[in-house]
Image: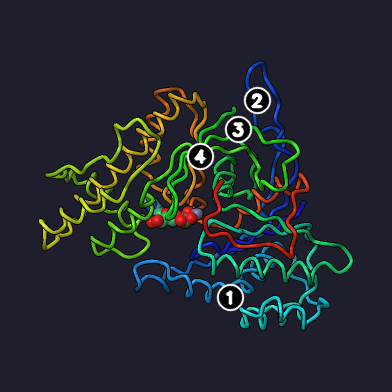
Amino acid sequence: MKILGIETSCDETAVSLIDADGDFGVASTELKAKAGTDFKFRILGDALLSQTLTHEKFGGVVPNLAKREHGKNLVPMLAKCLNEAKMLHPGTTEFDAHEMKEMLVREPELFAQLSEFLQKYKKPEIDCIAVTVGPGLEPALWVGINFARALCKAWSAGRRIPVVAVNHMEGHIAMSAMNCDLEAKTGRLAEFEFPALALLISGGHTELVLCREPPSPIASASQRWMKYEVIGATRDDAVGEAFDKVARLLELPYPGGPHISRLAEEARKKNIKASFSLPRPMVHEDTFDFSFSGLKTAVLRIVETNSPLTDEKKSMIAREFEDTAADVLVAKTLRALDTHGARTVIVGGGVSANKHIRLRLAEALNEVGVELLVPPPQLATDNALMIALAGYFHARNGDFADQGTLCANGNLSL
Ligand code: KG4
Ligand code: ZN
């Protein structure tokens, strides 16, 4: 099945095309179900444009700017993706311009670009479109949804192209649950036992989620691939948000995660240690919830007392902050494993690109004999491959969305 993924939930405009085959392949062993076996995919095309430079001067993502940029960038990303897949064939796609104009009434630039695109290129041989419907910034999500609907309409002459509504967080889980060979552009589902524990760490989320066997067939109303139970979540800031806010305090660019990580690594290399220690919020509390806003406030106080900030001081603070974030994530994950007995931890979301956090989790899980699944670092942050992957499992089960009622939900939960 050739499935096109579209992602516009935040500040990345991404389009990806995979050819996927097989199923989740749950095989019950004596006591536990095992995932894995025959699902595999090939990446045919993958295009992504980050809006970092647009939002950088505002110190964070501005929803209406993100919406505008998605409108500008979706067609070029689609063309790039299809070109890589060798599926961009000159010709014409017949479409009802009046109807499309209505569908894209809020995105006039997207309408103009898509009309031109359809007049220039034939319909590609794809089977299905998967689009992120939430969680995320609603104005941004709507652009992707309207684009998916317009494409479906235009490409459905002759054979209907169905749409799958994808939960962005499920996309992160799907991505991390794969074993990828990025050079060969192939991947397959890792084998793991249920229940697995997912640690989702991104700019908008910090969650511990129990993943159980997928219901078969997937209930269409639930829009779920596996069965999820959120057992812990942040009570205030997400961990990625804390990285970004601390980066701003240290006068580092947005998004701050990679910059904090680079400075922290420098501090470790130079053996620069902190002369203070930051609080580990809620680490000893008997809950799987997180809290990161106090940590940011504590960093603010340290910054104020250490002003003016030298490069060395910045590295020292970055290191202590990263160590603290890692301590909290490791402690809560171990606590959840203790209670729920999962044998696999699936870590996903932009913060899972962080080398130090990966290392700390790997060490801790190795000690307790639990397997760790992480995405390739370059696919930890938002991308459309993860949306195509999660979308596939729904499509395979016939869990398609009604195009007329497809809707963005900024707070969609797992
Ligand atoms: O998943 P993602 O791309 O977008 C959301 O769904 O939110 O995550 C973005 C977040 C940002 O907060 C960014 O600073 C953080 O991931 N991030 C990192 C690293 N790379 C990205 N945080 C820590 N270390 C990194 N290397
Ligand atoms: Zn994300």
Q: Which residue is mark 3?
A: 212
Q: Is mark 3 within 8 Å of ligand 2?
A: no
Q: Earlier in the sequence, mark 3 or mark 2?
A: 2
Find the distance from the CA under tag 2 to the CA under tag 4: 20 Å
Q: Which mark is residue 33?
A: 2
Give the answer, above or below, for where 27 lies relative to 251.
above
Who is closer to the viewer here, 151 or 190? 151
Q: Residue at x 55, y 32 (%)?
A: 196
Q: Earlier in the sequence, mark 2 or mark 4?
A: 2
Find the distance from the CA under tag 4 to the CA under tag 1: 33 Å
SS at circle 4: strand
Q: Earlier in the sequence, mark 1 or mark 2?
A: 2
Q: Are marks 1 and 3 in contact (CB under 8 Å)?
A: no
Q: Earlier in the sequence, mark 4 or mark 1?
A: 1
- Closer to the eye: label 3 or 2: 3
Q: Which mark is residue 230?
A: 4
Q: Residue at x 72, y 41 (%)?
A: 218
Who is closer to the viewer here, 60 or 138? 138
Q: Are marks 1 and 2 in contact (CB under 8 Å)?
A: no
Q: Which mark is residue 71?
A: 1
As shown in the figure, which amino acid type bears the numbered disc 1? Gly
Is 411 left or right of 293, judged from the image as shown?
A: right
Find the distance from the CA under tag 3 to the CA under tag 2: 9 Å
As shown in the figure, which amino acid type bears the numbered disc 3? Arg
Q: Residue at x 37, y 70 (%)?
A: 56
Residue 341 picture location, percent across and down? 49, 23
Looking at this rendering, what residue extends furthest in the right direction? 158
Is 6 left or right of 252, judged from the image as shown?
A: right
- Closer to the eye: label 3 or 4: 4
Give the answer, above or below, for where 207 lies relative to 257.
above
